[in-house]
């Protein structure tokens, strides 16, 4: 194989940068839509630290969170100061992810739960960025891979109390505490086989537990707390409107080149989000400049969901294709598939030169293991919940025909247990 020339490497670096810049814009817009977020973020381990493969800057992931933490020291004050704590906790999470990848934590799966801040829920902060109409919480399941770490990230909308409590019980994280105390907590597991599949099945259980709680309490069907029941995620909806994203990238580039400022960029992002939302609902949308889009922006909230962008990058592909609900013939997922009955993820693998026939064979074997994995996760998915042990009486342990006698000792006492014949059988 020939070594790429300097010019070829520069071209490859530029293409990678442009692709990642597009992904970042798509991720930003994803936060503005009401569809639930459901994605996997990929990190590569280099010299014992993780790099997000979708980052537009070649830097360790913990450098990104450190810079955000430093900026937050002066940016968030007064009734917004809780965000400084959250930025510090997110930086610590990034450092723990490095340790997870390097095998320093004693497990291969780390689970974090990021509830919508209490200050936002209770309406006692002026901070921008958190969508009050969604009240969106995040669950992040990190698992070690051969090349580093993947993060299975998904959202739960509307902060339903009973649903959040059940999610906490399932993840072994006490959600009755403050939102920042919950963010500081984590659950660490060691799953000997197929941690990727474990993460996917655990995600399904969490979403199901949350939605069941909402049905029981309110009689309303949801998907991850969202009103959208077709189980589409935000990134799939965005990718299906690739022409609007391409227009958006051209417009953003023009705004930046003219130095028009962040406010103009923010307004353009809102318009693109509204355009994609309308197009996904069947309306004809030519561009973000349509009159229908302006009306939509003026009547609905298309602000960002989070005050910071920590962990919201994801790999995605821009493909001109006709997408519809179906089953991928490679990975067998029920999702959006193109004209060849292949989902976006598998199509992207094909673009990278991966043999889809071999990938399909791998997934067939994976399916055969999935039933066994389902049974395993039902029995011992997580460490036991932190609940007080039930006290067992002596009569429950030894039977009703025993006789108990107290014996004083220095500094305390023993209980002597005698059977029906008067023989000492235990001292506790």
Image (cartoon, rainbow, N blue to C red):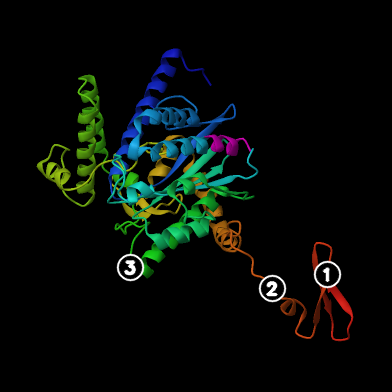
- From which residue to which does the magenta span run? 95-103
Q: Is residue 303 left or right of residue 428?
A: left
Q: For label 2, count other residues whose C-alpha is less than 10 Å away and answer few (under 14), some (14-19) or many (20+).
A: few
Residue sitting at x 86%, y 76%: 425
User: Residue 7's spot in the image, x, y percent?
Assistant: 41, 14
- Residue on which disc 2 sits: 392
Q: Quarter of the image for the C terminus: give it.
A: bottom right
Q: Is residue 345 above or below residue 395?
A: above
Q: Residue at x 81, y 78 (%)?
A: 405
Q: How far is disc 1 from disc 3 in space, using C-alphas?
A: 57 Å
In the image, 380 versus 339, the foreground residue is 380
Q: Nearer the viewer, mark 1 or mark 3?
A: 1
The percent coordinates of residue 160 (x first, y second) are 37, 59
* Residue 405 belongs to the span the image colors magenta: no
Quadrant of the rendered image containing residue 251:
top left
Judged by depth in the image, the label closer to the viewer, 2 or 3, is 2
**Mark closer to the chain start, 2 or 3:** 3
Reading the chain from its start, which is encountered first: label 1 or label 3?
Answer: 3
Residue 352 shows in this picture: yes
- Name the mark on residue 218: 3
Q: Secondary structure at mark 1?
A: strand
User: Total of numbered circles in the picture?
Assistant: 3
Cα–Cα gap, marks 2 and 1: 22 Å
């Amino acid at each position: 194989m020939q070594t790429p020339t300097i010019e070829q490497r520069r071209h490859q670096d530029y293409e990678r940068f442009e692709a990642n810049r597009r992904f970042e814009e798509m991720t930003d817009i994803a936060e503005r839509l009401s569809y639930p977020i459901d994605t996997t973020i990929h990190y590569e381990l280099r010299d014992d630290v993780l790099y997000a493969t979708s980052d537009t800057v070649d830097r360790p992931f913990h450098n990104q969170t450190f810079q955000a933490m430093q900026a937050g020291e002066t940016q968030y004050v007064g009734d917004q100061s809780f965000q400084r704590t959250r930025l510090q906790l997110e930086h610590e999470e990034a450092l723990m992810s490095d340790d997870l990848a390097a095998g320093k934590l004693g497990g291969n799966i780390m689970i974090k739960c990021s509830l919508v801040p209490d200050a936002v829920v209770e309406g006692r902060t002026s901070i921008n960025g958190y969508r009050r109409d969604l009240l969106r919480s995040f669950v992040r399941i990190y698992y070690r891979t051969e090349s580093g770490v993947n993060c299975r990230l998904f959202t739960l909308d509307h902060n339903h109390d009973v649903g959040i409590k059940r999610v906490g019980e399932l993840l072994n994280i006490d959600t009755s505490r403050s939102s920042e105390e919950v963010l500081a907590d984590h659950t660490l597991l060691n799953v000997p086989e197929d941690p990727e599949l474990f993460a996917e099945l655990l995600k399904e259980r969490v979403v199901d537990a949350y939605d069941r709680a909402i049905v029981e309490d309110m009689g309303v069907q949801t998907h991850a707390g969202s009103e959208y029941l077709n189980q589409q995620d935000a990134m799939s909806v965005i990718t299906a409107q690739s022409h609007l994203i391409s227009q958006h990238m051209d417009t953003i580039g023009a705004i930046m080149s003219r130095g028009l400022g962040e406010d103009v960029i923010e307004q353009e992002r809102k318009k693109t989000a509204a355009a994609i939302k309308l197009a996904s609902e069947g309306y004809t949308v030519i561009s973000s400049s349509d009159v229908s889009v302006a009306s939509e922006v003026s009547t609905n909230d298309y602000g960002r969901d989070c005050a910071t962008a920590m962990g919201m990058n994801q790999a995605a592909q821009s493909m001109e294709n006709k997408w519809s609900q179906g089953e991928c013939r490679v990975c067998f997922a029920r999702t959006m598939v193109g004209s060849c009955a292949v989902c976006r993820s598998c199509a992207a693998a094909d673009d990278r030169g991966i043999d889809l026939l071999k990938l399909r064979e791998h997934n067939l074997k994976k399916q055969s293991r999935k039933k066994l994995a389902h049974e395993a996760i039902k029995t011992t998915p997580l460490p036991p919940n932190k609940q007080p042990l039930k006290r067992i009486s002596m009569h429950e342990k030894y039977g009703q025909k025993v006789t108990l006698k107290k014996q004083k000792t220095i500094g305390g006492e023993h209980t002597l247990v005698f059977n029906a014949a008067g023989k000492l059988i235990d001292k506790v």
